[in-house]
Amino acid sequence: MVSTSSVQRQPRLVLCPYGIAVDRQTVCTSILHHCGGDVSRLIDGPAGEEPFLKHLQRLSGMLAAVRPPLILLTGVTPLMSRVVLLRERFEAELPSLRHADWLLFLDGDAVAFTKDALRLGRLERLSSTAIWHGPARKRYLVVSAQGDDTADLENGMLALAHSTNLTSVAS
């Protein structure tokens, strides 16, 4: 029999609908690893939202049978279409993804992201990460190439879990 604590520590499947740029693979896999992801079980293809969703639908039994995955979005602007609407669609078509943790890899125009994030929700700044509280009470851990410190990422995941649990209790 496997204890609950060892199940909680098992690395999680990682989904990357937009893939990971070659020059960002090292930092992204490090971030995912420190957030509890199993980078040897990373699904980042086929490329494109629609082909990726169809691929996941074929794996839906597996997605429901394992710990909820980590989902890393590497293309985050425009925020509404690349993040919010994508998550709504994926969760509607694959209900097992409603329990996933969503990470946003901010690599580029932080000003445009911040402007959109504040227009659509609020940002909670942590040391080198942030929690974005978006529409429909959805939470996202915002990470970047500059914030790959192990303790900061683990604390970010704890904060994400904590804010998600508070939302569940309030609903």
Image (cartoon, helix red, strand yellow):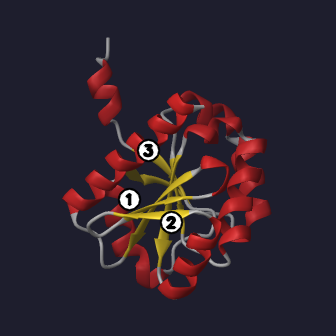
Question: Which residue has dot 1 on it?
Answer: 32
Q: Residue at x 56, y 28 (%)?
A: 65
Write the residue at 51% across / 87% down: 111
Mark with earlier residue (2, 1): 1
Tell me which amino acid carries mark 1: Leu
Q: Are marks 1 and 3 in contact (CB under 8 Å)?
A: no
Measure the C-alpha gap from mark 2 to mark 1.
11 Å
Q: Nearer the viewer, mark 2 or mark 1?
A: 2
CA distance for labels 1 and 3: 20 Å
> Does residue 1 appear in the picture of this structure?
yes
Q: Is residue 66 left or right of residue 76?
A: left
Residue 48 visible in the shown view: no
| Quarter of the N terminus within the rendering | top left
Circles 2 and 1: CB atoms closer than 8 Å: no
The crowd level at tag 3 (other Cα within 10 Å; few <14, some 14-19, many 20+) is some
- Residue corresponding to mark 2: 104
